[in-house]
Amino acid sequence: PIRTERIQQSARRLGIDLEKESNLAWLAHAASDALSQGGKVLPGDWMQHRDSGTAMLYYYNSLLRVSAWSHPLVDYFEFLTTQLRVHLPSEPSPLPGTTLP
């Protein structure tokens, strides 16, 4: 149940309606796995830190010298969601020479 909740939360965060966009469920699942690791899964030169004044987590990229309050993979998964909506069919397509029921 907790894993399902996390997947649903990731789907909502990415704007994926799991009932209408079942073809993107795998992406919500991947985002859930990556983002639920407590910040341990980070791309490239990103590191997780805690703000001393607020005790909130933030992320810092030492190469780019930028910081962010949200996990850097959130932007990546939002980009993927947008791209996949354009390039993936919303309904499964039949194989050539076959029909769907």
Image (cartoon, rainbow, N blue to C red):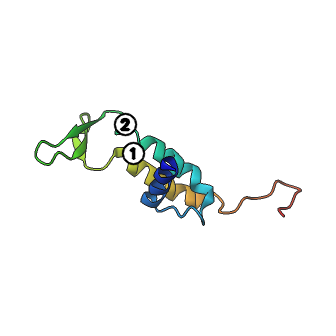
Which residue occupies the extreme left position in the image?
53
Q: Residue 20 occupies which quadrant of the picture?
A: bottom right
Dot 2 falls on a residue whose secondary structure is loop
Which residue lies at the image location 51% right of the left edge and 61% below the top edge?
16
- The answer to whether one can see residue 80 in this image is yes
Distance of label 1 from label 2 (alpha carbons) = 7 Å
Please provide percent x and percent y for residue 54.
14, 49
Which residue lies at the image location 52% right of the left edge and 56% below the top edge?
83
Say if 89 sits above or below 26 in the image. Answer: below
Q: Earlier in the sequence, mark 1 or mark 2?
A: 2
Which residue is labeled 1 in the image?
Answer: 73
Q: Foreground: 95 or 19? A: 19
Which residue lies at the image location 60% right of the left edge and 65% below the top edge?
19
Q: Is residue 7 left or right of residue 91?
A: left
- The answer to whether one can see residue 79 in this image is no
Dot 1 falls on a residue whose secondary structure is helix
* Amino acid residing under circle 1: Leu
Which residue lies at the image location 46% right of the left edge and 62% below the top edge?
15
Please provide percent x and percent y for residue 10.
45, 54
* Amino acid residing under circle 2: Leu
Which residue is labeled 2 in the image?
Answer: 42
Q: Which mark is residue 57?
A: none
Which residue occupies the extreme front position in the image?
1
Q: Foreground: 95 or 17? A: 17
The C terminus lies in quadrant:
bottom right
